[in-house]
């Protein structure tokens, strides 16, 4: 959920909207009495809900305002994955993308959690699991000779991606998911939303852990 | 996201992990907003009492022979809503590097706030009823008094911001104090719009 009040500018806009909405109610109460004012308030409330529903349907996804990266060296690749971090397909894709270049890889592992645990702030387990997966892939990338760093991200992968892009302006993003039907991220259209939100090229890698031969070395 | 990224080989530091931080919002601003949310809940409890009295009592509001000074309150509303524009102007000014605009905006906002509070206090003396004159009076003084206390807090913040501005604080890149005070002032403004509409005219 995006907080609509994130700055003084937002708060000011909200104040003006409240003033504009309440002005006809107050005017109706002063001129015609409380009954008419309540009718106006009801009508405005209905209109507001209707407008919000229509605006929500029509609203096009906003592009994230991210700073561009300075052209100061090798390729920068952002990898976003969680359970599929151990997948061979993802490793192959990273190596393919980074081959022959002085590549720098930043891996983001969203700390996936249940709704109940999220709302009760019980995310230690999810973060520990994400940290273990992250450390494993960083070890592998390090052994393969890449400059790799990483971080644990928000449980919303698109938000985690945006957070990472703010500190690591990448040339491209690789998003790894389970196959369709098993992937919660695909169910939530994470890849599509990310492509709408970010201008950076995004590659989607499907990792089928059930078909892979075994733990990667 | 954690501010300190895990670098290879340093994933398990001995010290506790840094607080999880999303880039969606500045943490200081988030603190201000959470504080305002708690304040909105406080106002919500007072409004609950107000609506309970109005609905359960089902009597004229205010009861005869009392009357609220609606026109004075309307003038106060115009003053307070206008002050939201001036504080917004102050912030926009410092964002553009206009220090004089910041000083003027904050000073005018402060004066408007003082005018509002002075008018409110004057209104109390001339209201013709006291807090002991029934539930309606308790609710009236409770809600408007609670709001007045918030205006006082807002004025304190604005006074501090005025002093800091005169001492040369704040730049186009660093003006969190004005931003936080501005958000709080807008909150006070919104609450008054609701108080005025519900208590005075509905």
Image (cartoon, helix red, strand yellow):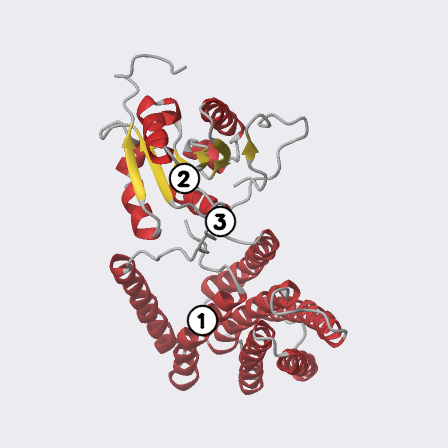
Q: What element carries label 1?
A: helix
CA gap, disc 2 and disc 3: 14 Å
Give the mark nearest the N terminus, 2 or 3: 3
| Quarter of the figure with the C terminus of chain B | bottom left
Q: Residue tagged by mark 2?
A: A77
Q: Chain letter of disc 1?
A: A
Instruction: Tell which residue pokes out farthest to the front in this image.
Output: A100
Q: Residue tagged by mark 1?
A: A18
Q: Is residue A89 above or below residue A59?
A: above
CA gap, disc 2 and disc 1: 45 Å
Q: Residue tagged by mark 3?
A: A72
Q: Chain letter of disc 2?
A: A
- At x 61%, y 75%, the residue is B97
- At x 62%, y 37%, the residue is B18
**Residue B103 is drawn in which quadrant?**
bottom right
Query: Residue B26 in the image: x percent, y percent?
Result: 56, 54
Judge depth for marks 2 and 3 and give the one in front.
3
Q: Is residue B55 above or below residue B162?
A: above
**Residue A172 is drawn in which quadrant?**
top left
Say if residue B60 shows up in the picture.
Answer: no
- At x 50%, y 25%, the residue is A135
Give the mark nearest the N terminus, 3 or 1: 1
Query: Residue A22 in the image: x percent, y percent?
Result: 43, 74
Judge depth for marks 2 and 1 and give the one in front.
2
Say if residue B193 shows up in the picture.
Answer: yes
């Amino acid at each position: 959920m995006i907080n609509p009040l994130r700055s003084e500018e937002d708060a000011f806009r909200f104040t003006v909207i409240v003033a504009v909405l309440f002005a006809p109610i107050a005017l109706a109460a002063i001129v015609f009495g409380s009954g008419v004012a309540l009718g106006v308030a009801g009508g405005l409330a209905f209109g507001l809900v209707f407008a919000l529903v229509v605006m929500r349907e029509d609203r096009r996804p906003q592009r994230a305002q991210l700073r561009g990266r300075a052209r100061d060296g090798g390729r920068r690749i952002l990898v976003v994955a969680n359970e599929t971090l151990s997948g061979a397909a993802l490793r192959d894709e990273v190596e393919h993308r980074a081959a022959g270049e002085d590549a720098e890889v930043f891996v983001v592992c969203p700390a996936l959690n249940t709704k109940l645990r999220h709302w009760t702030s019980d995310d230690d387990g999810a973060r520990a699991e994400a940290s273990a997966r992250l450390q494993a892939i960083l070890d592998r990338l390090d052994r393969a000779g890449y400059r790799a760093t990483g971080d644990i991200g928000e449980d919303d992968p698109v938000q985690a991606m945006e957070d990472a892009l703010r500190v690591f302006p990448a040339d491209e993003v690789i998003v790894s998911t389970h196959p369709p039907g098993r992937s919660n991220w695909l169910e939530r259209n994470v890849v599509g939303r990310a492509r709408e939100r970010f201008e950076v090229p995004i590659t989607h890698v499907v990792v089928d852990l059930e078909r892979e031969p075994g733990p990667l070395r | 996201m954690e501010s300190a990224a895990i670098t290879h080989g340093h994933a398990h530091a001995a010290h506790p992990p840094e607080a999880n931080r999303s880039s969606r919002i500045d943490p200081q601003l988030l603190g201000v907003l959470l504080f305002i949310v708690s304040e909105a809940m406080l106002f919500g409890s007072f409004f609950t009492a107000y609506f309970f009295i109005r609905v359960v009592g089902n009597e004229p509001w205010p009861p005869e022979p009392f009357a609220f000074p609606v026109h004075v309150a309307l003038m106060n509303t115009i003053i307070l809503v206008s002050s939201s524009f001036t504080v917004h102007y102050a912030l926009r000014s410092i964002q553009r590097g206009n220090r004089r605009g910041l000083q003027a905006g904050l000073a005018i906002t402060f004066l408007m706030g003082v005018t509002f509070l002075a008018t409110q206090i004057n209104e109390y003396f001339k209201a013709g009823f006291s807090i002991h004159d029934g539930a309606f009076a308790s609710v009236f003084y409770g809600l408007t008094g609670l709001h007045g206390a918030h205006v006082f807090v807002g004025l304190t913040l604005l006074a501090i911001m005025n002093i800091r501005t005169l001492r040369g604080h704040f730049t186009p890149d660093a003006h969190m104090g004005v931003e936080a005070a501005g958000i709080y002032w807008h909150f006070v403004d919104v609450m008054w719009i609701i108080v005025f509409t519900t208590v005075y005219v509905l």
